[in-house]
Amino acid sequence: MNRKPNKGLIVAVVLVGLFLVAPTLIVMVMSFSSGSTLKFPPEGLSIRWYESFIDSSQWTRSVWMSAKIAVSTVILGTGLGTLAALGFVRGRYLGRGIVTTIIVSPMVVPAIVIAVGMYMVYVRWGMQGTMWGMVAAHTSLAIPYVIVNVAASLQNFDRNLELAAQNLGAGPIRTFFRVTLPLIMPGVAAGALFAFMTSWDEVIVSSFLASPQVRTLPVVMWDAVRTLVDPTMAALATMLTVLTVVLLIGATVVRKVGMRKR
Amino acid sequence: MSTSTMTASSVCEQESAPVAQSGALSLSGLCKSYNNLRVVDDVSLELRPGEFVSLLGPSGSGKTTTLRIVAGFIKAEAGVVTLDGRDLTGVPPHKRDIGMVFQNYALFPHMTAAENIGFPLAMRRQPKAAIRERVEEMLRLVHLEGLGNRYPGQLSGGQQQRVALARALSFRPGVLLMDEPLGALDKKLREALQLEIMRISRQLNITVLYVTHDQAESLVLSDRIAIFNEGRIEQIGSGEDLYERPLSLFVADFVGESNILRGVIADNAEEQVRLASGASVRVSQRACRRVGLSGGARAAVVIRPERMAVRPAQGEDDGAASDSELAADLPGKLREVVYLGSERKYVVELAGGEVVTVRVQEGTAEPLTCSGVRVCWKANDCVVVADPTLADAGSASLSAVKPGGEATEGGE
């Protein structure tokens, strides 16, 4: 299909693209400002706000905390979500539809409702302000995304492959790790990526569950935006955007390489 | 006593010197239902070591379910599967040591051909060097030398099938199960692979249980064929047994092409089957006894198209009754002639409304052109089976009787 592109279409595409990307680009440009206020266009060019970010223990501590929580969420959420997806796709039991709806509900219930509910329960249980409490909350938010992705790849999975593995001498556990898991890996990896982003980006629930010791990056950013607005924020936002883009490109490359083998 | 046992065992050793004679598979009384529907109903079958047995039947007749019970994927409600005397009930599939080739190959797409073939050996924790050697050996056996590093997606359908076969055999299972392994391939490839499967199974002297709905395939491959119908085995025997001596109407109809004439065995003389049209067909008493039928029973006379003869009707109807060799000599109208190269197929509507097909080898007779013909066959060339058709179907065939037909209905 080598069609001549329509000029009007090109203009429309560029405009829509600009509309979507321009705010991010503006923030990126501002982050290299040498002035001390957020201003566009910036007064001069420097990387002083990146230095200020790295020098500030408040920022680096929250990055470290966010990373620990996100990685824990990925491990827990991907593991549990994959098992749950197996149960939903393979299982035949009473109330399967209801269980599915409940587990997937964090995707549709407003975050503020979940946040308030969790806060009240966590205070009672003494989990409010703890890192593992935060991990548990993020995991419950991440699981639906893992389930949706893994279930999609399980739908297309030929179960004869598992029967073949068993027939050839693999028990249930080795069948899972040698045959099923490698083949649903694209779905699991996509689920893990979503789990990471869910935890890494989460503001609302995290704000309710945070304590001075346990503050994730988005929580600190939110507070910072409300109190002082200096270009450190822009520097941070730029770094986060770059990280996200790198992750997404990485995931695409991994999937493409995986596909080529088949 | 002791001397005779000794000679017997020494003969056995001579015959099977290189391979241990194992692979005696026995299924007895297998039953399985889904939603109160019996899909496998009291299936029993004995396979001798090295024997090739096909399960042949229409789709939904329970043959694949039977195979999956043997593989251990499905639990039977009743019945026992044993392999070399070992009861497999409750043995999980991965501990059965039975190889299986699936309909769509079920090759692991994330492993190379060599890794697929080596998989069962890796599961048995064999040393890497031994696995590599055995994989090479198997690749040679299925003529895929040098393709071990390809992924299944890079192989053709026929090559994938060969990998699947090699994988199912690499761990030297006692029995090989095959579930319509050639169903997805085109005709030419299918025929080539049939010969390949035959060669390999003979070479390894392995017991094979083979599911197919293609009767030509089962005739080519099998020592014996089990005909499945509605969850039951209708008949087990060699291809010749099934074709020449079917025991039921289903088998007669399912295996090969056949002409079926329904009627009732005459009360007084068991050597006559009276057709709906009133015409009589002579059958031997032995033929009726073979299937346990006696006077008054509903019966169907089965004649293969190539065993019938057709000739122009000359003069009056009763002209041919003199030939005592003939079982019947029925008048009919020629409806269609089909030229098939080596033979000519005549479709004839008999006076009673039954339509029969006659195959005549080219060059043995002048092609017929007239519409009035007579169809005949010898008593030895037909078999009698019970006719399980329900009463209303019977009346339907009676209504097909032409108004001109003799009224022998109440003539008792």
Image (cartoon, rainbow, N blue to C red):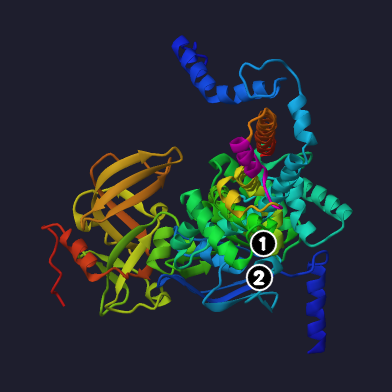
- Pick the front one: B40 or B398: B40
- The quadrant of the picture occupied by the C terminus of chain A is top right
Element type at mark 1 = helix
Taking A232 as reference, is B369 above or below it?
below
Subunit that carries the residue with mark 2: B
Within 10 Å of disc 2 (Cα), the crowding (few <14, some 14-19, many 20+) is some
User: What amino acid type should be assigned to the residue bearing mark 1?
Assistant: Gln
Residue carrying label 1: A166
Residue furthest toward the left?
A: B403
The answer to if B291 sits in the magenta stretch is: no
Subunit that carries the residue with mark 1: A
The answer to if A215 sits in the magenta stretch is: yes
B64 left or right, relative to B270: right
Residue name at image x 74 percent, y 27 percent = A49
Tell me where the magenta segment starts and ends, as one range.
A213-227
Residue name at image x 54 percent, y 47 percent = A152
Taking B234 as reference, is B293 above or below it?
below
Residue carrying label 2: B92
**What x and y, as percent, mark residue B291?**
40, 75
Q: Is residue B310 visible?
A: yes
Residue name at image x 59 percent, y 37 percent = A226
Residue furthest toward the bottom?
A: B1
B118 left or right, relative to B211: right
